[in-house]
Structures are given as C-alpha cells and as structure tokens.
Image: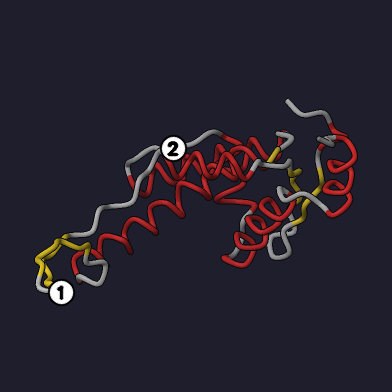
Amino acid sequence: MSNQNELTPFTFKDSKRTVFLRKVSPLLLMELRKTFPEPKPPTQEVEINGRKVFEENRAHPDFKAKMEAYNIEFEGRMRKFLISRGVVVTPTDEIKAEVEKLRADWLEETGVALSGSDDYVYVSYIAIGTEEDMEELIAEITQRSQPTPAEVELSKVTFQG
C-alpha cells in the first residue's frame, strides 16, 4: 500500500467526506480499453470507380445503438477501476458501521448482496453524494495522473538520450 506521503486528501464537496487519492497511470486506462474491445460495425457493399468494395458503416442505427451501450459499459468499468485503484480509505469504526448498515439495507430492499469491497462501497455509495461529487473525483484522479510541467522538465534532464 502507498505510504501517506504519496497520497493527496480529497474532500467531496457535497457529502463533505474526505478520502485520499493516489495517481493512476493513464497507461492502465489504455490497457483497460484493450480488455474491452469496441463492437465491429457492419459492412456494406459500395461501388467506387466502377468497383464493388465492402466498407464499414459506422452510421448504421444498430451499430450506433451498440456503441452507445458499449460506451456506457466502458465508462462504468473505468470509473470502478479508478475508484478501486485511485482512492484510499482509512476504515474507521464509523465507516465500517455505515458500510455494514448500507449492505444490510440493500439486501433487505433488493434481496441481493451489494457487491464490491468495503472501500469501494463506501466511496461509491456513501462518500459520493451527487453526480457532481463523482465527476470531480474522476477528474481529480485523472488530472493527478497526468505529469505536471515540473515533472516533464525533470524527465528531460533525467532521461536525456
């Protein structure tokens, strides 16, 4: 686990809860996309200069619907990964009790156990109070993951050819 010096505190504006953030490599998000490839568009026969060829039809309504579903699913996977990897929670007795109560309430209401680690459940369903909290969290994790101008300059000196 990261030591405290590598973590940055983050307070959700709406829920007023504080967690710690760590950098998540943008390369991991690229690898995540590789594990979940886009659907293939249908092809259609077209005539170009008297020759018949097959081209992808990305404007086909069925493909557009598949891409919309794909993008929603990928966004969910990315958010889950960013929360699981980029957010560190110090599980106090109060947090543990809140998560336990939420799991019990969910099970009673739905008949299904709420999945995810206690940290993930706490961040996703308790600490994130609004859509704005979610957007700010994701932005903070991904922005922190980009190199700062100072880090870019340092890398130029450190990794000279």
Residue, disc 1? 49
Q: How is the image coloured?
A: secondary structure
> 6 or 31: which is nearer to us?
31
Q: Earlier in the sequence, mark 1 or mark 2?
A: 1
Residue in view at x 26 percent, y 67 percent:
58
- Residues packed near mark 1 inside 10 Å, few (<14), some (14 to 19) or many (20 plus): few
Q: How far across and how far down the image is residue 158, in percent?
A: 88, 35
Q: How far across and how far down the image is residue 71, in percent?
A: 39, 58
Q: Quadrant of the N terminus?
A: top right
Give the side of residue 134 with respect to residue 114, left or right: right
Residue in view at x 23 percent, y 59 percent:
41
Secondary structure state at the residue bearing disc 2: loop
Give the side of residue 26 with respect to residue 160, left or right: left
> 161 or 8: which is nearer to us?
161
Residue, disc 2? 115
Give the side of residue 39 with respect to residue 155, left or right: left
Residue in view at x 62 percent, y 37 percent:
85
As shown in the figure, which amino acid type bears the numbered disc 1? Asn
